[in-house]
Amino acid sequence: MVLWGMLETNEELLDAYSKAVVKATQRTSPAVVNIEVRHGQTRGGGSGFIFTANGYIITNSHVVHKASAITVSLADGRKLAADVVGDDPHTDIAVIRVLEDHLTPAILGNSQSIQPGELVVAIGNPYGFQASVTAGVISALGRTLRSQSGRLIDSVIQTDAALNPGNSGGPLVNSRGEVIGVNSAVILPAQGICFAIPINTAKYVAGELIRQGKIRRGYLGLAGQDVPLPQKLRRHYGLSQDKGILIIGIEKNSPARESDLVEGDILVHFDGLPVSGVDELHRLLTEERIGRTSGLTLLRGTQKIDSAVTPSEIT
């Protein structure tokens, strides 16, 4: 009797897991597209997802960078020509557009609210197999990934949901069918180590690309990851946020190298504003801060240190 009860419980758990995957897939799949790219005589491709009803699509920069022609296949089978609206190799995010209205956009979530262990579903077109679905969990947060431009992409999501060539640019969604990441990279020959760009980063980048076709942003030259702040230090120094940015690397010949920053510091304020994560710092490194000295507040051990840095422009 006990064994039978255990079997029933296991079946219920599996059924709930399956329903969550099916629900997330059904909610997002209409927005997922296949992208065929031509670079001269060579062809390539990847995935993407519609995020506005009037045809704007998010994908990876490395999928469409320097493409001479782009064709998008919608979930209903239509094939449409697309143009690059903007391309940001530093975050591996690009926006393309098809001239079509009344499309079904994906629902965008909040990547700052996710936690390791959460169920995630990856949807894409690996090897041309359209709308392929894999499921897994968020393995870790705060990873750093080097983009094809050579710059480090911070606060990357690690997942064990299987990705293959052609998945790049497709959505990583939670159990509610909300996009929380843009699938980007696979570590080979490792099994189950895949990465996605956080959707909060992608939303900011996409918005800037639509507005001006590129992102003119400040550059510090540091690698960081989001970390919780000890409660005692928060109270002692009157910090309003519960997270900061742990400095885990500083690039040579960079503004950060010329400042007082050292690896192991926790950045809590930039230019007088609290920063609780890498996404927030990226949003603050706008073009008006390029060449202008900005104050920094750091935690070094139990000490609070005031410093300054002058962002340069990413080229």
Image (cartoon, grey):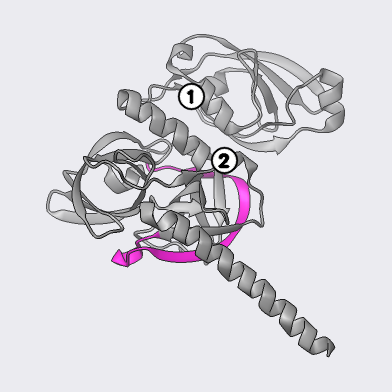
Q: Is residue 3 left or right of residue 106?
A: right
In the rendered view of the protein, which quadrant contains the N terminus? bottom right
Residue 219 in the image: state x and y as whole percent: 47, 23
| Relative image position of residue 11 (x, y in whole percent) | 67, 79
The percent position of residue 33, horizontal first and vertical second, equals: 32, 54
Furthest residue toward front: 102
> What span is colored magenta in the figure?
124-148
- The crowd level at tag 2 (other Cα within 10 Å; few <14, some 14-19, many 20+) is some
Question: Relative to 80, is 25 on the left or the right?
Answer: right
Residue 142: in magenta span: yes
Say above or below: 15 vs 311: below
SS at mark 1 in the image: loop
Kindly report which numbered mark, 1 or 2, lies closer to the viewer in this rendering.
2
Q: Nearer the viewer, residue 204 or 42?
A: 204
Image height of 18 relative to 44, above or below = below
Q: Which labelled disc corresponds to residue 178?
A: none
Whether residue 58 sits left or right of residue 301 in the image: it is left
Determine whether, in the image, residue 50 is placed left or right of residue 187.
left
Mark count: 2
Q: Residue at x 17, y 55 (%)?
A: 42
Q: Which mark is residue 110?
A: 2
Mark 2: amino acid: Asn
Q: Where does label 1 land, which residue?
A: 253
Whether residue 233 appears in magenta in the rendering, the answer is: no
* Residue 186 visible within the image: no
Q: Residue furthest left?
A: 41
User: Foreground: 222 or 177?
Assistant: 177
Q: Image quadrant of residue 61?
A: top left
Q: Amino acid at mark 1?
A: Asn
Which residue lies most toward the bottom here?
1
Query: Viewer-proximal residue, 100 or 190?
Result: 100
Give how far apart the Cα atoms at labels 1 and 2 are: 34 Å
